[in-house]
């Protein structure tokens, strides 16, 4: 066996406690073998028996070992549009700026943007994400190379398209979902991804969801993001969006919806009963002034709530630490209660709940779990003193505090050096793709 030991750190356990422990990983299996009490010489010992000698050790002294963070909703190649169009509401932002720019994006551009996003995620301790975009074979290549885990899908938009183009978009999404599932040694999983309940017509939604059920892949879409999106559904159908989703058979236990900002009590009950997860994207919701998701109420009702950055054009970064802080802050404001959405809750949302929402392994540091973790350097002024490491994760730490990132037993970043991607090249390529893109759009 090839063993990797993350030694000498403090480990965040699934119950939210933090203990001094070494984490021993079976690299071949990509699994955590043991979480042992650390001894003076840094060897796993104490209560853990039969822990193999390490072939490689990652130093975690003075650091906090946490599950790899999960970014449960993004459009990773949108890093190319970071800062391209700001300060507009969703509908105008998409129609006036983003969609016209995306119409010019080539598969090479998507690959360049996805590589930049992957670099950003590895550097900030994210090991798994959900991605809705296009040219998904290119995104899959990047994920494979970067060593990350993903649930990806081709996003379908049918508004403004003719029947043939609309149908082809649905077929593309289903083909991606069928063909890429299980790629990269199983690190790539897929979903059918209609963009939203208003940007895809009813007939194609119904057909696509039925085909997704047949293929055994989940459904991921944007739901209840803005008032402007909820109103037409209510006006035309006389039912709320989540009821419409249920009517489409899109409200299943493996499905996960982004946003869930404007959900009423009946919709919260339906989501909870169906076991459909909600991906809260607080920064995007604030930036586009979409509204405040009722996170505390969703969680109290038993809905699995994960965290997502959404695309870098509405955030404007892919740092899940920021998302934890934003979720806690806006959650308190929305509930008018400083005790709402506490530190432990957002940490759980960014780890175990994220993995559960996406149906991916990871999210917990315990024997048998996927070896996906991040090591956060606590040796920094803004993290001193350490009264409560969980508080720091939620409120004070940032992505740049991550020293090491491990996914599926592979070290993706070691002492802030990304091993799987050439950081310099990735940045240069993305910057030049972005400036060429803007020239094409404006010219
Ligand atoms: N095949 C589609 C592409 C859809 S990908 C998913 C889409 O979601 C868009 N998007 C990004 N952030 C958000 C958001 O917050 N709400 C809704 N859509 C978003 C993104 O720009 C992208 O166009 C087409 O032909 O246009
Ligand atoms: Zn989105």
Image (tube, grey):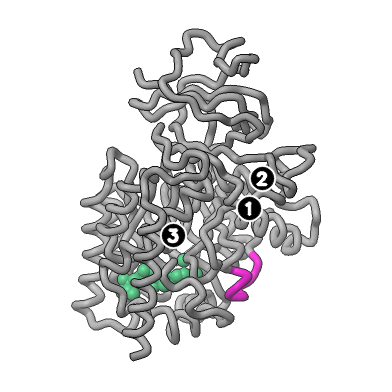
Residue 270 in view, yes or no: no
Q: Quadrant of residue 60?
A: top right
Cβ–Cβ below 8 Å for labels 3 and 1? no
Position of 433 relative to 48 (above/below): below
x, y (%) of residue 210?
A: 28, 58
* Residue 147 lies in the magenta stretch: no
Q: Quadrant of residue 165?
A: bottom left
* Residue 290 lies in the magenta stretch: yes
Which is nearer the eye, 52 or 348?
52
Element type at mark 2: helix
Q: What whole-number distance in Å separates the C-alpha atoms at marks 2 and 1?
A: 8 Å
x, y (%) of residue 337?
A: 80, 57
Please name the residue that numbered disc 1 is placed on. 324
x, y (%) of residue 160?
A: 32, 84
Which is nearer the eye, 6 or 269?
6
Q: Main secondary structure of the magenta part?
A: loop
Cβ–Cβ below 8 Å for labels 2 and 3? no
Say which of marks 2 and 3 sits in front.
2
Cβ–Cβ below 8 Å for labels 2 and 1? yes
The numbered dot on residue 393 is 2
x, y (%) of residue 62?
A: 66, 32
Q: Residue at x 63, y 14 (%)?
A: 39
Please name the residue that numbered disc 3 is placed on. 246
Residue bounds of the magenta highlight: 285-292
Q: What whole-number distance in Å separates the C-alpha atoms at marks 3 and 1?
A: 29 Å
> Which quarter of the rendered picture does the N terminus lie within?
top left
Which is nearer the eye, 154 or 192?
154
Element type at mark 3: helix
Position of 217 relative to 73 (above/below): above
């Amino acid at each position: 066996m090839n063993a990797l030991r993350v030694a000498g750190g403090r480990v965040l356990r699934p119950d939210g406690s933090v203990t001094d422990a070494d984490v021993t990983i079976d690299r071949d299996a990509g699994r955590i073998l043991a979480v042992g009490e650390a001894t003076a010489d840094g060897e796993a010992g104490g209560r853990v028996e039969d822990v193999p000698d390490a072939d490689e050790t990652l130093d975690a002294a003075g650091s906090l070992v946490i599950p790899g963070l999960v970014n449960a909703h993004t459009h990773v190649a949108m890093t190319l549009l970071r800062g391209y169009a700001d300060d507009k509401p969703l509908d105008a932002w998409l129609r006036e700026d983003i969609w016209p720019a995306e119409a010019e994006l080539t598969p090479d551009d998507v690959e360049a943007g996805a590589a930049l996003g992957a670099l950003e995620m590895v550097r900030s301790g994210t090991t798994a994400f959900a991605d809705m975009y296009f040219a998904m074979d290119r995104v899959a290549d990047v994920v494979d190379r970067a060593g990350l885990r993903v649930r990806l899908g081709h996003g379908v938009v049918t508004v403004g398209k003719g029947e043939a183009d609309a149908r082809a978009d649905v077929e593309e999404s289903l083909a991606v979902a069928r063909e890429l599932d299980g790629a990269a040694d199983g690190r790539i999983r897929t979903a059918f991804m209609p963009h939203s309940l208003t940007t895809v017509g009813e007939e194609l939604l119904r057909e696509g969801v039925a085909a997704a059920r047949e293929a055994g892949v989940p459904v991921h879409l944007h739901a209840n993001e803005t008032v402007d999106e909820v109103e037409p559904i209510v006006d035309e159908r006389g039912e709320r969006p989540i009821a419409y989703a249920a009517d489409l058979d899109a409200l299943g236990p493996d499905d996960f919806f982004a946003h869930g900002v404007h959900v009423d009590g009946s919709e919260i009950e339906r989501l909870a009963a169906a076991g459909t997860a909600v991906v809260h994207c607080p920064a995007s919701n604030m930036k586009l002034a979409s509204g405040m998701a009722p996170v505390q109420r969703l969680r109290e009702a038993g809905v699995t709530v994960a965290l997502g950055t959404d695309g870098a054009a509405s955030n404007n970064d892919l740092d899940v630490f920021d998302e934890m802080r934003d979720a806690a802050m806006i959650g308190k404001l929305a509930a008018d209660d400083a005790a709402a959405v506490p530190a432990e809750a957002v940490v759980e949302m960014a780890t175990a709940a994220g993995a559960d929402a996406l149906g991916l392994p990871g999210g917990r540091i315990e024997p048998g779990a996927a070896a996906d973790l991040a090591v956060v350097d606590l040796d920094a002024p803004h993290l001193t003193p350490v009264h409560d490491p969980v508080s720091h994760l939620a409120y004070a730490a940032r992505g740049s505090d991550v020293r090491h990132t491990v996914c599926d037993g592979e070290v993706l970043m070691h002492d802030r050096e990304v091993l799987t991607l050439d950081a310099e090249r990735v940045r240069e390529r993305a910057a030049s793709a972005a400036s060429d893109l803007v020239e094409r759009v404006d010219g």
